[in-house]
Amino acid sequence: ERTVGPTLGAESIRSGVTASIGGLSLVVLFMLFYYKLTGLNAVISIVVNLIILLGMMAYLGATMTLPGIAGFILTIGMGVDSNVLIFERIKEELEAQRGVRASINAGFSRVFWTLVDTHVAALISCAFLFNFGTGPIRGFAVTLFIGLVSNLFTSIFVSKTLFEAALIRRHQVATLSI
């Protein structure tokens, strides 16, 4: 048995938050560098995801712990993974000489069930962690559960809406910065 004082616990949480912000910053830079302007779509989607997650955690009155921070970090990773799957599928469609709008629609529709499948598998894991875990493990499961649900929403609906909003402004779209 090991007891951790409040000072060490607060320092650990501060370090975890710093690591989360650092990781998010690196993810943002990578997405903007690799996917160009489309990377901005992913960044907005991930930020909206985290806002929803923070809002739900505040609504539930959850306390930020190290397992909760780990759930936030994993949520960021799942958000990036979802966007990478979508963007790579759009790239494949563009290489097949389909139009920009058709490539975006096909990219989202063909990745949809893959995203649902991966998120449902992770949600099942969350259910087992919550059911059989203790306090900190349950906190991780709750954070990850909310993060997965919000990520599925943002990667499909928010990201697609951002693409549609960008395409509406231009009548004839010949290329996509991806």
Image (cartoon, rainbow, N blue to C red):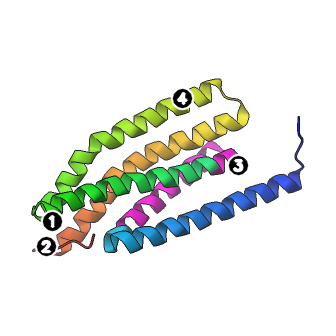
Q: Position of residue 60 (x, y in %)?
A: 61, 42
Q: Which residue is mark 4?
A: 127
Q: Which residue is mark 1?
A: 100
Q: Is residue 45 magenta?
A: yes
- Secondary structure at badge 2 equals loop
Q: What's under tag 2, amino acid-wise?
A: Val
Q: CA distance from mark 3 to mark 1?
A: 43 Å
* Mark 4 Cα shell of 10 Å, populated few (<14), some (14-19), many (≥20): some
For residue 102, say whether it is visible: yes
Query: Would residue 167 appear left or right of 156 to someone viewing this image?
Result: left
Q: Position of residue 82 (x, y in %)?
A: 38, 51
Q: CA distance from mark 3 to mark 2?
A: 46 Å
Q: What's under tag 3, amino acid-wise?
A: Leu
Of labels 2 and 4, earlier in sequence is: 4
Q: What's under tag 4, amino acid-wise?
A: Ala
* Mark 2 Cα shell of 10 Å, populated few (<14), some (14-19), many (≥20): few
Q: Which residue is mark 3?
A: 66
Q: Residue at x 48, y 62 (%)?
A: 47
Q: CA distance from mark 1 to mark 4?
A: 39 Å
Of labels 1 and 4, earlier in sequence is: 1
Asked if labels 1 and 2 touch by Cβ distance under 8 angstroms, the answer is yes
Of labels 3 and 4, earlier in sequence is: 3
Q: Which residue is mark 2?
A: 173
